[in-house]
Image (tube, coloured by chain):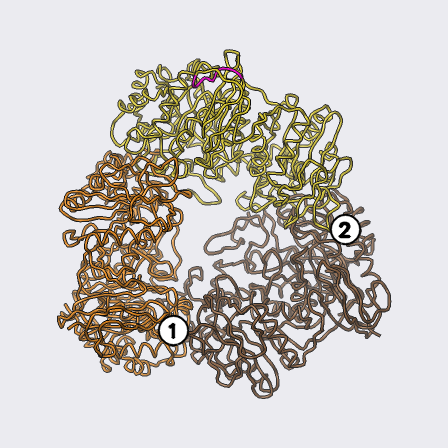
Chain colours: A yellow, B orange, C brown
């Protein structure tokens, strides 16, 4: 499937309106060149007010009106928030976490594997999708929304997990006890019926396995919904899902509770919500990393199903930023930018998560900037739709490692995603194009360099594959703790960093807290003027064949290495045995990519440059100014700057929070 | 009813004594000129040791001894702490909060609407009050103590709330769903029996309604107790209740869980406990705001049923402060000052909340200062009892707004009461006399200026009344977020600040977090040397007819107004669209009150001046020095300084933590 | 019983090994001169895989192999972690805390008084101990591990407590109500069956009594286990237990939940685990205070059953420290130093609590230092085993006071142990030898000086004994809050500090928070250049016969004393009515011990000196350098420095983290 135009739109909740203003809303949407809305994903109780009584009149009304206006519609299955009558009739559908059943109210607090819930969800989905599938406004479907397992440890989940483990270990309890170290603290399981509730477990390996099992519940649940929708959808309609990321008030990093790589398999398109800091805190890094992952998921363009308009008080964009952000999504490979949401809501939990319109529904600076952006996208759509790009660098991420490290943290301040972002953000700021994949989906041979943060829990086989990749000419950057445990989070019994010691040319016996210790640069890679401080973790590396890039300044440990580089076969590795400053990482990366001949630009952040090929076969180069200062691009690609429709070359100024889009000859 | 003399006394717990020393205690009380004690409000289990077995012998003993000594007694109904046998027999009387029933032990953790509790409370109250009513020592009653709803969500409360909502909406679920926005997240209620438990609600409007319902449980409960007591009390006895305030280790601001204005209606006198910082942190502001509210409640003098003697280690007063504080209460309109409590307790939760006496029952510096104060009050009582005053300024407070903002906070650091106090304290420090009322009780026409902090949830009707008030010559200071939602906490769909836009001459579409943004003064009201920083919130105001007092310094938002002034009809308004520093508020208020010709003194804090009329028809002026320095009053009112019984005029010194009381000619 | 040699070893978990390497492990142990292992204390589910089915094959295998290698074995009863089948069959064995039953998983979360648990524990202990008792490798037993009451408030505990109270008060409820002040807040108990659950109590006296009752459950439980083991053990085998301390990530202070003094009575030896900060934070103070207490418990040498090898990332020792620490334990009176543990564990909760070996089982710097230390201890054992010493100073500690102050804290930052350590650490740093005892075990007449921190809850009798001790020539240092309440935590009604006022020559009526107040030195004891700041608490002392060492600088309270000294009979006291800086405490202590002629060295921390007599009748003096600098000892005892086997006298250098052991002539 490929898109005919850039979709630009918004989530629209007709059901939430304080008074009926559908026609006025559509008039304002058309004026803003909005051509798509997403509807329906959270209003089950409106469509099925009583058990078995259905009322799609509001849905129909919106579909008809949108169709009449020429606006496309994506219809969501309404299952991520359940009706009160369902929770009242069957209290057991509510999720049970650590023995405590959640009270009805919020969305996303039922058990996604509960058979009663699934029976009711099956019926509403079939009723709703069969009802709308033939409507000419409908271009696609979103199954559920931001699905996760919601921490469920309901008894059916516990039972399912025991069956899963029994199956995985062919019923061999000795093997299970051995692999998970269950003799420890008398946790040994000597009969399957003794398998204790996971609520109290202190076994981090078992907990990680349980997390994996629960992530798989999400996979199964989404696959089941996709298959349901597929029974009804027309061939020109697509199915997507709205993924999200580790949330720190915005999209921070890899999602712990969902395996995006597996979960996206049954989808036609990857879809995503991306929220980020704004105003002077805006860097674009979240749009870039999330986009890189989404684009890699299906090796295709993706859909931004939600991103911020006014949002919260700390996120209201400066003039220019909203427009810049829309182009940023497209520059990363998005074919759709959809705001959350059209009108600010007048009651309940998200009253202050503001949309394009304020509560008064009147034009305002944000709406006006949406309108400007809509007009530009509408005009430039043929140049911007279905952009394709290739990356020389891939990030190898692992939510198995991420969740394993929740039980075995390397820090009380930082987690997996901090390290991932520490590395990612420097590649981003150096304008190096990256993919983001996982161990089950990556095609190593496509990449010159693979960046591997904290690959804590991983099979022997994959580590050997990485060694092989390096031997054959590939390059890898590893951080500390990589290779430490196997896929069941059992620590390896070989010298650390385990199997990759071979390619890294180092091993270590001790690891310590820095507690004020700093780096000592051993070659020219890292400047002595850098911030040489260390956070959280340092491994006392003993080089076998590796060369030392930096050591430690503690007199007791001054002979150990901190960061090393090693040639192995045709390739090479960098091993970072500690958590250094951003400045040190930047120099490390910059030197290495230059040495490897990986493409980057002279310009660096706050000038961000993204390149891709369009359907016209032309090179599109986006230039973004992520700062409040007017800046100068020293040597712009010669070509047509599409927004102002002018020829450009050489030196050119770029406005604060500005964007230039150059189509090459 | 009016009082014959200033009552000066203490809570007295004969039942808590480690050994019987009633006679010695009374001897010490008489030496200190104590003329009233409050007894009985927390010893139900002593008076009814078994279900249906009553023993008032200790009560009788105290009443007889007090009467003999000529000390008046206020008797409390003993219901705010229940006996263990009641909780054992009927566990369901214990309050249930979020599905969790509290374990017996503390006071104030039963369900005040539980029918079994009420049945037992009815019996003990009737038995006890009928037993004491004719005793000549008894001058009045306190019903219960610091009553609140204790967060109850017991099932009878849930059922009661559903009935209440059904009644309020005449059974019209569509209207309910519409007004509360329940389609959101599938929360729509399609049958009354589906109404989910409030424990899990994510609907802030519904939650605010539930808070209001629970505040009304308090109203009903107190009214029921007052009516019970009224059946027995003699005509010369009064009924009061001990209200309290938002607690931050002391009485900080408006009480969220009780509607003082409604709850005080059935009482003869408003009663209150007031606790405050002490030593170098003592300002007197808590005594002033609490007194202003209490005096306004029934437009009459009030009773300070509890205030601190030694209290906690951080509150032990400097020499002089205790005496100063007693006069401060009277200066605000109190007819009684009663300490909590006589003797420090030797066991249990409040062992370190010390009374007048330490645990050794011997005279100590605090007791000695009580004695000095007691002698002065005894002597000056005819000049100080039943003081009357009128205010030109009223604060309009709203605990509906306060509780609504718990779900919709403007800040993660500050709440409603911070803003209330930010404004109140500047009026206090400028020695401007204020009343404090609410929307259902205020008589707007009495005031030149009404100060309206954060009136977040309020009916159209009242906002129109405020507009009318201004049109007819009144003046209002509004802060940000006023008028934002209706009485059900549904955001208004008109441009903000809604209905009051008319009187304020401004509107706004966007509001943002300051994040370092500062004010830019636009006229002479605010000095450029002030602390121009902003906290938490800024609305981007667009003046329609208003004049701009200050703008913002963010270049992106420099054209918006921050603080505006508007003439409307015969009156005017100030609208403060942000949360500025105390220095800015002070200038704003000072300029405005001077412009409006509102009475204030040249002296400002730490010299605090309060004025009133006494029963002799004379003007009484109190001068307080709230500092550790000796200060000079430049121009004291000519008259008799009552404490030292001397004529004063012109310049006069005032001791650290000193007080002067001048009776005019 | 006395030991033949210094035991040096490690906890060993054969059951946890990822592969069988018993022979390799023993080979490495022998190479390191390890001569003892502790096994078996946490693997019940391995030894009894099903209810009633026993399998000691792994235990046997280890015993046989150790015996063959000449390594001694201490066998633990395996009861501190229960099998999953037991929790599944009898959920009621899991501990219930505040009405919430813990989920199976962690160790130490069952109810130690549950009859079903005790029945099963009885059986496994009998089976296991009878199975191993005659094995020649076994030298002793450890009953359970770090036993505590785990916060149990299961219903049998509640019932037991009520019976206990009924018995203690001979059924006299009036006496109970009076002593615990239960009239307060209607908590009066008028029938034993009304006694409410302790879960909700707000009565700190009752809570302290409940804590004492639960500590007694620990005493009974350990005594029961010791008696069980005694039925089987041979006469040359010993029984010990592994006590631990208040945990702040390491062994910080007195254990709140166990009465070490009572609990150790049935044991042959006191045993202990000691963990402490390391690297630049290492002072040795934890080894010293824990050792002083353990040595005093049975007035004998003790066993260090656990101490750290690599431990956590922040604890990995600098080169030299591990060896220094082993000698430190012996210098305090330990006859055994056992590491926790041999090999780092590959799964579950303590994966990062590393042992001597890393996860790769290979020699590493820590193992190498163990080997060096093992060789030295092996060689010097005849000189170092069964060292005896006597102290002139005793600390009088009270976990009744400690737990009582949880309900009545003097600070929100510091607790009992902070004050204990504030005093202890200064004695330690001045190289003054101390014992640590409690009120039921101390022989006052043995000591010149008794140091009494925060003796908050204590009987009249003991206070009178302390007065008597002073009268007869003893000396006492008291801190603030001592003597304040009786043994039931009822505040005394006499002037404070109660009975000890007599010996201290002071009393006080008021106590306040310092809030910036500082000390004013009144004589030469405290230098005016010291840090004169105060923390948390100050009593306004009124000297009766005492001389003033320091006053307060607050002008309001400048006439009160802060620290006083008093001669009483033949002895004297110092009373510290506030919480001063370490510098002030150091001067106070130094002056007082010098005045009293108590032995200390000229050298002070970081040079630590410990002295004892060995079995050869010679004086052994240990010198430790607790710093990263090379230091000089000015005047070493003349004799043989045993480690390097050389004669020493006069001035001598000591390496960073070094140790010298001098045997006198």
Image-quadrant location for residue B312: bottom left
Which percent across, then down, holds residue C349? 61, 47
**Chain ID at mark 2:** C
Between residue B343 and residue A51, name the one nearer to us: B343
Query: Which residue ends up furthest to the right in the rendered image?
Result: C646
Q: Is residue A463 left or right of residue C635?
A: left
**Quarter of the rendering occupied by the C terminus of chain C:** bottom right
Q: Quadrant of the N terminus of chain C?
A: bottom right
The disc label shown at residue C367, or none: 2
Q: Disc 2 and disc 1: Cα gap in Å?
A: 60 Å
Residue position marked by numbered label 1 in the rendering: B344
Q: Which residues are magenta?
A: A638-644
Residue A352, placed above or below residue B259: above
Element class at badge 1: loop
State the residue in front, B401 or C93: B401
CB under 8 Å between callouts 2 and 1?
A: no
Tell me if B116 is positioned left or right of C322 in this view. left
């Amino acid at each position: 499937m490929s898109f005919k135009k850039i979709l630009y739109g918004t989530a629209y909740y007709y059901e939430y309106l304080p008074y009926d203003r559908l026609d006025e809303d559509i008039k304002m949407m058309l004026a803003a060149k909005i051509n798509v809305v997403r509807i329906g994903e959270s209003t089950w109780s409106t469509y099925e007010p009583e058990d078995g009584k259905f009322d799609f009149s509001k849905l129909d009304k919106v579909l008809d009106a949108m169709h009449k206006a020429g606006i496309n519609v994506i219809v969501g299955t309404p299952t991520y928030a359940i009706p009160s009558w369902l929770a009242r009739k069957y209290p057991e559908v509510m999720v049970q976490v650590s023995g405590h059943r959640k009270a009805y109210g919020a969305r996303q607090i039922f058990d996604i594997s509960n058979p009663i819930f699934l029976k009711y969800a099956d019926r509403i989905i079939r009723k709703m999708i069969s009802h709308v599938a033939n409507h000419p406004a409908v271009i696609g479907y979103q199954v559920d929304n931001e699905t996760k397992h919601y921490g469920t440890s309901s008894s059916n989940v516990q039972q399912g997990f025991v069956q899963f483990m029994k199956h995985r270990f062919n019923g061999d309890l000795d093997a299970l006890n051995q692999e998970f170290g269950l003799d420890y603290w008398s946790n040994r399981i000597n009969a399957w019926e003794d398998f204790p509730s996971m609520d109290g477990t202190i076994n981090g390996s078992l907990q990680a396995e349980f997390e994996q099992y629960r992530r798989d519940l999400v996979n199964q649940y989404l696959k089941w919904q996709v298959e349901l929708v597929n029974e009804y959808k027309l061939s020109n309609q697509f199915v997507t899902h709205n993924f999200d990321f580790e949330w720190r008030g915005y999209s921070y990093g890899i999602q712990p509770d969902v395996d995006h790589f597996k979960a996206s398999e049954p989808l036609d398109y990857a879809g995503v919500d991306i929220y980020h800091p704004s105003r002077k805190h805006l860097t674009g890094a979240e749009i870039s990393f999330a986009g890189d992952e989404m684009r890699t998921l299906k090796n295709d363009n993706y859909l931004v199903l939600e991103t911020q308009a006014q949002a919260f008080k700390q996120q209201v964009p400066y003039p220019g930023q909203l427009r810049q952000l829309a182009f940023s999504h497209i520059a990363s490979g998005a074919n759709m930018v959809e705001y959350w949401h059209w009108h600010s809501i007048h009651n309940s939990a998200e009253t202050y998560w503001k949309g394009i319109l304020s509560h008064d529904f009147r034009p305002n600076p944000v709406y006006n900037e949406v309108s400007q952006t809509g007009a530009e996208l509408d005009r430039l759509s043929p140049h911007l739709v279905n952009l394709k790009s290739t990356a020389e660098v891939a990030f190898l991420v692992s939510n198995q490692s991420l969740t394993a490290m929740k039980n075995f943290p390397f820090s009380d301040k930082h987690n997996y995603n901090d390290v991932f972002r520490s590395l990612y953000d420097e590649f981003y700021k150096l304008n190096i194009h990256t993919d983001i994949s996982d161990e089950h989906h990556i095609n190593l041979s496509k990449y010159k360099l693979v960046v591997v943060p904290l690959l804590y829990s991983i099979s022997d086989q994959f580590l050997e594959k990485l060694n092989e990749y390096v031997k054959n000419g590939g390059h890898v950057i590893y951080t500390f703790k990589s290779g430490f445990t196997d896929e069941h989070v059992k620590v390896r019994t070989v010298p650390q960093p385990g199997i990759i010691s071979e390619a890294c040319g180092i091993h270590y016996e001790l690891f310590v807290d820095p507690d004020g210790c700093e780096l000592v640069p051993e070659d020219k890679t890292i400047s002595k003027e850098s911030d040489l401080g260390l956070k959280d973790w340092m491994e006392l590396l003993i080089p076998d064949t590796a060369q030392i890039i930096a050591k430690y300044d503690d007199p007791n440990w001054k002979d150990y290495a901190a960061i090393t580089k090693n040639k192995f076969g045709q390739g090479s590795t960098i091993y970072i045995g500690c958590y250094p400053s951003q400045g040190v990482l930047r120099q490390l990366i910059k030197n290495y990519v230059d040495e490897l001949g990986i493409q980057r630009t002279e310009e660096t952040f706050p000038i961000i440059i993204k390149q891709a090929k369009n359907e016209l076969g032309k090179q599109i180069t986006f230039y973004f100014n992520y700062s409040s200062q007017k800046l100068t691009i020293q040597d712009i690609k010669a070509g047509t700057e599409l927004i102002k429709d002018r020829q450009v070359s050489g030196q050119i100024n770029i406005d604060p929070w500005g964007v230039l889009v150059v189509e090459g000859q």
